[in-house]
Amino acid sequence: MQEAARGQEAAAHPTTNEPPTTNEPPTRRPGYAQTFAVPEFRAVFAAHALSLLGVIVSEIALSVLVYDLTGSPLLSALTFALGFLPYVVGGTLLAGVADRFPARRVLVVCDLVCAACVALMVAPGAGIGLLLILRCALAVVSPVFQGTRMATLADILGDGDLFVLGRSLLRIVSQSALLVGYGLGGLLLTVVTPRHALLITVGTFVASAVLLRAGTAHRPARTGAQAGQGGQGALVGDSLRGARRVLAHPRVRALLLLFWIPPMFAVVPEALAAPYADALGAGSTGLGLLMCALPVGTIAGELYAGSRLRPATRERIALPLVCATLLPYVGYALRPGLTASLLLLLVSGAGSAYTLGLDQWFVRAVPEELRGRAMTLLTAGLMTIQGVGMALAGVAAQFAGVRTAVAGAGVLGTVCCALLALGARRTEGRDRADHDMTDR
């Protein structure tokens, strides 16, 4: 979802990895409002909100539909799980799409493919097998779409602070959707049937495609027109080679791990919220609060860091924050009540503001010709490892109890984050040197 700058905007937001130069004295630092001054970003933002709405509605409606067809809680839960697992397939085998073809075309086609998959779910007679296969197809396409959008965001906003703020805004919308989206989706199903609700998803995906096609500019493929030739085998091979090239950069590899590993531990309280609320005797209200606390903290932290801190400050505090963000989980060992647990989750969520610093380092470290597949790998790894974290949280809680599992995630996660931060610190200054190795 993104692309299109004309004249002055194209000059104001360069698409190279070199910082813009100017003879004018520096003005006030960019803010969130300045991202909306770029017409292409407005289109990307609106398309993101629409497609996110469609995803939320489809997840709820499809889960209810599967349960209505089968009466099986397991298959209903599996419908949600399938939203995580196929990410690794699309993120590795199809990552080359993001750089082999023009970005706008990739984004529009991905939206239309998703719309077609959901439309098939609505078809009369669609059985449980077909529904689950189509759910997997959506999850395979998703990392390609998100990775391409992230890469193109750097073309639209430049690879400086506006890019970081644009990424932050998209994350804030996603976190906000966790707070209100599922509740509104549940209300929707009291008015319409699950299949009719899925029709809304078709409309949101089509609307997103229209916005991206009309509101963003055409840009050529990053790896040249010849890279788009060849069949599926050529695409898979190119995607795997691209993944190896991305992971061959020590700096990029260190930053990817910093993006991936903390969320694997961060999802533990969310995964165990239901049994923890039950242990506290907090009921459904307590469960809802526990599920909301982490996203609220994340939104607050990102908004503060994006609007109040300078880019250099955000980069300076990124590694200390990533080392501290999971420490509040250790407080679960003290058997806190509901209020104290919510405060621990809020503080931990606020610590995730470290991602703004990582965003700046990552876009600076990745060679431009690999940007699309690097962003796709980042997205696929992030979603996959969160699914792994949820599964491991359940295993740990089964043997050690919920509080011990969360506190253990805090201790082990903090140790891992500290080691990863040291590794990232050792790779500082490798950004440009790594670029020179791209063709080796």
Image (tube, rainbow, N blue to C red):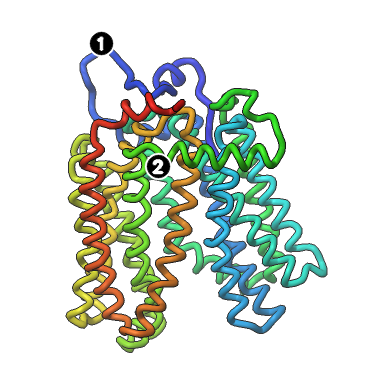
Depth check, front residue: 213 or 412: 412
Q: Which residue is found at the position 25% from the left and 48% from the top?
A: 304
The image shows residue 260 at horizontal and vertical percentages of: 37, 54
Task: Judge from the rendering whether residue 233 lies leftward or rightward of residue 409; answer left or right.
Answer: right
Residue 44 showing in the rendered view:
no
Circle 2: is it few (<14), some (14-19), or many (20+) Cα within 10 Å?
many
> Sequence order check: which comes first, mark 1 or mark 2?
1
Q: For residue 403, which numbered disc appears in the image? A: none
Do labels 1 and 2 touch, CB within 8 Å?
no
* Quadrant where the N terminus is found in the figure: top right
Q: For residue 167, which numbered disc appears in the image? A: 2
Q: Which residue is mark 1?
A: 23
The image shows residue 3 at horizontal and vertical percentages of: 53, 30
Task: Judge from the rendering whether residue 75 lies leftward or rightward of residue 428; answer left or right.
Answer: right
Residue extending furthest toward the front: 440
Q: Which residue is found at the position 50% from the left and 62% from the top?
A: 181
Up-down relation of residue 214 to residue 342 (above or below): above
Q: Which residue is found at the position 50% from the left and 44% from the top?
A: 376
